[in-house]
Image: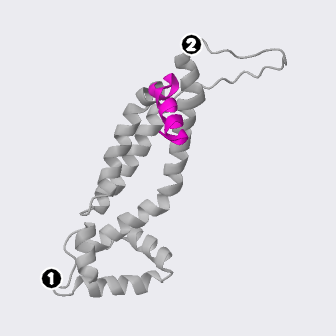
């Protein structure tokens, strides 16, 4: 066995790794569900947005914790963990949750989610003022020009219109 393999095996057998996996089980299951939805070949845009928002909300709920607000000016004071669980929560678990949340919020920011909802609304041929504003801003087009184009699209024959909001139906429509 190579040195890399032995190193990985050693790390996996360590208490910290096993304990970390146990603590992360719930979070990894939540992420797996959303990941499966996002990787589906028949991805539904609105379902994907709902899943991403739900995951972010769940991570925020899991991440609720009390934060100390007392400032200690004594240089001799030192913090010791009472047990391994507290040490893992503070030095690993909460740090990982903070990282996950910031990554989720940067990757799936409100602007991106609003754009996806606007595209789904467009594919349903629903002309809403909020949706028009989002699409106009994204496409750098005036609201009136976009509204005119959408009215033209709305009055096309049914055979030419998009059939659903899944990624598969969008690809078929664009072809």
x and y percentages locating residue 27 in the rendered image: 40, 36
Residue in front for this viewpoint, 67 or 80: 80
User: In the image, is residue 9 part of the stretch drawn in magenta?
Assistant: yes
Q: Residue at (54%, 27%) from the top-left corner?
A: 65
Q: Is residue 78 visible?
A: yes
Foreground of the two, 109 or 13? 13
Q: Is residue 23 above or below residue 49?
A: above
* Residue 110 image offset from top left, x and y in percent: 48, 57
Looking at the rendered structure, the secondary structure element under dot 2 is loop
Please tell me which of labels 1 and 2 falls first in the chain: 2
Choose top left, top right, bottom left or bottom right for residue 135: bottom left
Dominant SS of magenta comes to helix
* Residue at 24%, 82% in the rendered image: 154
174 up-or-down from 57: above or below? below
Q: Which mark is residue 134?
A: none
The secondary element bearing badge 1 is classed as loop
Give percent across and percent down for residue 18.
45, 26
Instruction: Assess disc 1: are there few (<14), some (14-19) or many (≥20) residues with their C-alpha within 10 Å of its C-alpha.
Output: few
Q: CA distance from mark 1 to mark 2?
A: 66 Å
Label 2 sits on residue:
83
Q: Is residue 124 above or below residue 15?
A: below
Magenta span includes 31: no
Is the residue marked by circle 2 packed among few (<14), some (14-19), or many (20+) residues within 10 Å? few
Q: Residue at x 34, y 38 (%)?
A: 29
- Camera-near label (1 vs 2) is 2
Residue at 40% across / 49% down in the picture? 53
Magenta residues? 1-18
Question: In the picture provided, is 33 more to the left or to the right than 99?
Answer: left
Residue of label 1: 158
Which of the pair 25/117 is nearer the observer? 25
């Amino acid at each position: 066995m190579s040195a890399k393999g032995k190193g990985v095996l050693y790390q996996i057998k360590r208490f910290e790794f096993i304990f970390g996996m146990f603590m992360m089980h719930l979070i990894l299951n939540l992420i797996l569900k959303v990941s499966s939805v996002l990787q589906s070949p028949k991805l539904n845009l609105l379902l994907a947005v709902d899943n991403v928002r739900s995951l972010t909300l769940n991570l925020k709920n899991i991440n609720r914790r009390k934060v100390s607000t007392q400032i200690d000016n004594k240089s001799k004071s030192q913090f010791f963990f009472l047990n391994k669980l507290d040490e893992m929560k503070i030095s690993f678990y909460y740090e990982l949750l903070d990282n996950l949340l910031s990554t989720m919020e940067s990757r799936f920011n409100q602007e991106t989610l609003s754009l996806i909802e606007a595209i789904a609304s467009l594919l349903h041929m629903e002309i809403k003022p909020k949706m028009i504003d989002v699409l106009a801003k994204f496409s750098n087009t005036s609201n009136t020009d976009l509204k005119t184009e959408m009215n033209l699209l709305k009055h096309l024959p049914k055979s030419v219109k998009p059939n659903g909001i899944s990624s598969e139906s969008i690809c078929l429509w664009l072809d």
